[in-house]
Image (tube, helix red, strand yellow):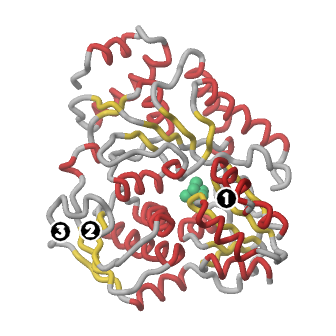
């Protein structure tokens, strides 16, 4: 790899031990992927923040890097294993809370902003078209590449941290225009509405792309989509298909920048939507947990939930998972008061997937196809997908 004099100095240890280690990680990665050199990144988003994922070994690595490491660019975190303020109310045990705080404090020592969210683009870690990033959370990577038109590979925990400490990432993969063209044409012949249905669409496309081993769909036939619907779609297509980039005709910024793929294509009919939605509803489910905000809820979604809950009481455990800055806006707007008076709980900084709640509930209802996947696979819950309205209905019935 060709390195600039500054990058060579980083590798030689002139900027300290952690920067040297970080540059070693990045040059190794660059050599594996035949990168010609490095590119400067605008921002970083680090995943693998939950103590449940990191354990003591992961924390030891972080502590080593924090000895003299300081971030060079804006860096935020993915959701942690608990709400940093409200963890007791959410039933998180004291020992876990202590360890989770050790992790967050170590990130803070390196100058990382300890906002823990999978929707950094909604809360200030907001790139623009064409800018290079080093992000790790799969749904956010997909959103930044596809909806914003920024450029990032899906980073692992160590490579994202290495980019944070150097401000660099190897120039390969989705950083290069030649790797960003559509590979499969998808004709959507059904009307798609709502976060739940966009999640269902993401599962259909993701499942199919997995079979074809091609990852970049060019999607025709979706007439409009909100930010919330797109974030749900991104989470789902990334979960089921490993997709980090798509083009949606008339909606995403690069849709007409590359030739439309012709060799591989498939159609999605209304019957496919119905069938796949049914796959996300387990039989004999007994719902004792409702969770909204996967990916983390926007202020629009929180406003909608507060309107639906006004004057009502929930009868089941009901979490709204979001970023803390969004929760603060909800506090100021009066939405939080309505939601909390109804008995629902905010779970900021965390979510129903990364919190250590395996086996604690029998059945979960969500509006997110991604949460269905991990609800089953990780937490061993039965799952049911529904609209936001149906989820609130279930919580109060
Ligand atoms: Fe975010 Fe958790 Fe869903 S990290 S995308 S809310 S599984």
Q: Residue at x 76, y 81 (%)?
A: 286
- Image position of 49 with respect to 23: above or below: below
Depth-wise, is mark 3 or mark 1 nearer the camera?
Answer: 1
- Image position of 151 with respect to 341: above or below: above
Query: Upstream in the sequence, badge 3 or badge 1?
Result: 3
Q: Are marks 2 and 3 in contact (CB under 8 Å)?
A: yes
**Secondary structure under the numbered disc 3 in the rendered image:** loop
From the top left corner, tell me how far across and down residue 187 is, in percent.
Answer: 28, 80
**Secondary structure under the numbered disc 2 in the rendered image:** strand
From the top left corner, tell me how far across and down residue 314 is, in percent.
Answer: 82, 74
Name the residue carrying label 3: 261
Q: CA distance from mark 2 to mark 3?
A: 7 Å
From the top left corner, tell me how far across and down residue 364 is, in percent.
Answer: 70, 72
**Residue placed most toward the observer, 208 or 384:** 384
Q: Quadrant of the N terminus?
A: top left
Q: Residue 218's mark? A: 2
Query: Upstream in the sequence, badge 1 or badge 2?
Result: 2
Give the image quadrant in which the ligand numbered 1 is located: bottom right
In the rendered image, which quarter is residue 14 located in?
A: top left
Q: Decide if ligand 1 comes within 8 Å of the CB at mark 3.
A: no
- Image position of 232 with respect to 174: above or below: below
Q: Would residue 60 appear left or right of 236 to someone viewing this image?
A: right
């Amino acid at each position: 790899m060709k390195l600039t004099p500054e990058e060579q100095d980083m590798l030689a240890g002139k900027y300290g031990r952690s920067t040297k280690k970080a540059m070693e990680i990045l040059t190794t990665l660059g050599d594996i992927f035949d990168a010609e050199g490095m590119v400067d990144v605008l921002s970083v988003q680090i995943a693998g923040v939950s103590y449940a994922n990191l354990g003591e070994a992961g924390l030891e690595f972080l502590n080593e890097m924090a000895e003299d490491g300081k971030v060079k660019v804006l860096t935020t975190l993915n959701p942690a294993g608990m709400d940093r303020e409200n963890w007791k109310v959410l039933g998180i045990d004291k020992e876990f809370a202590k360890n989770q705080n050790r992790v967050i404090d170590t990130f803070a020592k390196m100058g990382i902003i300890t906002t823990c969210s999978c929707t950094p683009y909604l809360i200030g870690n907001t790139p623009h078209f064409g800018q290079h990033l080093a992000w790790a959370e799969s749904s956010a990577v997909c959103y930044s590449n596809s909806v914003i038109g920024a450029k990032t590979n899906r980073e692992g925990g160590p490579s994202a941290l290495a980019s944070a400490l150097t401000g660099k990432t190897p120039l390969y993969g989705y950083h290069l225009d030649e790797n960003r063209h559509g590979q499969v044409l998808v004709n959507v012949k059904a009307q798609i509405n709502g976060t739940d249905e966009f999640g269902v669409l993401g599962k259909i496309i993701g499942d199919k792309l997995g079979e074809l081993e091609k990852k970049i769909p060019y999607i025709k036939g979706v007439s409009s989509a909100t930010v919330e619907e797109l974030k749900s779609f991104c989470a789902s297509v990334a979960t089921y298909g490993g997709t980090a980039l798509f083009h949606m005709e008339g909606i995403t910024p690069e849709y007409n920048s590359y030739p439309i793929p012709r060799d591989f294509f498939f159609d999605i009919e209304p019957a496919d939507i119905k069938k796949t939605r049914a796959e996300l509803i387990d039989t004999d489910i007994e719902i004792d947990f409702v969770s909204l905000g996967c990916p983390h809820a926007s202020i629009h979604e929180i406003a909608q939930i507060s309107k639906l809950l006004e004057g009502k009481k929930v009868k089941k455990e009901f979490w709204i998972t979001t970023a803390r800055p969004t929760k603060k806006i909800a506090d100021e707007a009066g939405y939080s008061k309505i939601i909390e008076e109804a008995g629902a709980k905010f779970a900021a900084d965390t979510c129903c997937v990364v919190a250590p709640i395996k086996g604690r509930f029998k059945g979960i209802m969500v509006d997110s196809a991604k949460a269905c996947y991990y609800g089953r696979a990780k937490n061993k819950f039965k799952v049911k997908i529904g609209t936001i309205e149906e989820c609130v209905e279930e919580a109060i019935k």
